[in-house]
Image (cartoon, rainbow, N blue to C red):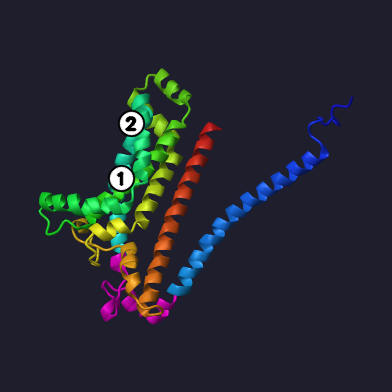
Amino acid sequence: MDIKTFTPPSLTKEKLRFTQVFETLISLTIKAAGYSAIVFVLMIFYFLLSEGTAAIGEIPPQVLFSTRWYPVEGYFGIWPLIGGSLLVTVGATLFAVPIGISTAIFISEIAPRWLREIFKPIIEILAGLPSVVLGFIGIIALAPNLRVLLDLPTGLTALTGSILLGAIAIPTIVSVAEDALDGVPRSYRDAALAIGATRWQTIWRVTLPAARSGVLTGIMLGIGRAIGETMTVMMVTGNAPVIVRGLSSLFLPTRTMTATIAAEMGEVAKGSVHYHMLFLIGVVLFIISLIVNITASALVFRSNKRSDRILS
């Protein structure tokens, strides 16, 4: 009997045809889902542009790029909002990255297995905690204590928003970074320990560099979530659209782009200058988020390429 032309009795021509059709449908469905994500993003960007670009023609450039935001009197300066968003995001990054990476290293490399089984679910639960709950905690507990501790006129400052945004970003950073560290082969650690490296040297110079791409991805995802957060910053940053003057502005009230859109969109007349300006802020926020994602992809690609070159 010719083995090459043998067909198992259980696989008739009808079953083979059904299997091929089913696999084709699954493949087309997956491709359609992938392409639809791109289409949805492009549709959102087109909608923002169609509503927001009108503000460029309605507002003079010297007003659009001024340092005052007071729409009631016709001041639509976008710089205080951009500066406030970047200030809070930078503060959240400075707070979240060291704690997030350290926690991921502890869970993956130091904690015993029974403790890891407790910590990991808790981190996952914290990732799903509603931001409005953290904002409520910030108003009731964090802001008053910061005001007394730092002797500030008010506790509703950019620093309060940065700490809470950092708390929101930490679970994402920990979860992704811990998975990346856990994925490093055990042979890397054994080889480093065999040549006389200490446990800390193995973590810092072997395990962490090997998981660099996953760690960077976790950091960028955390930063991306901090940039797009709305309720927390609207509740605890004071919502004062003032120009940012360095990191010292962390101790002053500020206002972010997301908080401005959420606070004012329900009060504007559709088609007004103020309405179009809020959509233009959305366009700027979309572009900033896109830059963060592209930067993350470039860093991960460069890290993977460097790792492949070392292994080859």
Which residue: 43% across, 24% down?
Answer: 189
Classify 10 Å Cα crowding around label 1: few (below 14), some (14-19), many (20 and above): many
Q: Does residue 37 lie above or below 59 as drawn?
A: above
Disc number for residue 288: none
Residue that numbered label 1 is attached to: 96
Dot 1 lies on which element?
Answer: helix
Report whether 76 appears left or right of 32: left
Q: Position of residue 128 (x, y in %)?
A: 37, 46
Q: Does residue 180 lie above or below 61 as drawn?
A: above
Disc number for residue 106: 2
Q: Does residue 287 lie above or below 189 as drawn?
A: below
Estimate the spatial distance between the alpha carbons at disc 2 and disc 1, rounded to whole Å. Answer: 15 Å
Query: Which of the pair 263/162 is nearer the observer?
Result: 263
Query: Which of the pair 65/155 is nearer the observer?
Result: 155
Q: Which stretch appears magenta?
A: 53-81
Which residue: 27% across, 71% down?
Answer: 67
Which residue: 37% across, 22% down?
Answer: 197
Furthest toward the right, the residue is 1
Please say whether residue 201 is visible from this viewpoint.
no
Please say whether residue 185 is visible from this viewpoint.
yes
- Which three-letter amino acid code belongs to the residue tagged 1? Ala
Query: Which of the pair 196/91 is nearer the observer?
Result: 91
Query: Which of the pair 64/151 is nearer the observer?
Result: 151
Magenta residue check for 73: yes
Q: Position of residue 41 (x, y in %)?
A: 51, 60
Q: Position of residue 143 (x, y in %)?
A: 18, 53
Which residue: 88% across, 27% down?
Answer: 2
- Which three-letter amino acid code belongs to the residue tagged 2? Phe
Q: Quadrant of the C terminus?
A: top right
Magenta residue check for 102: no
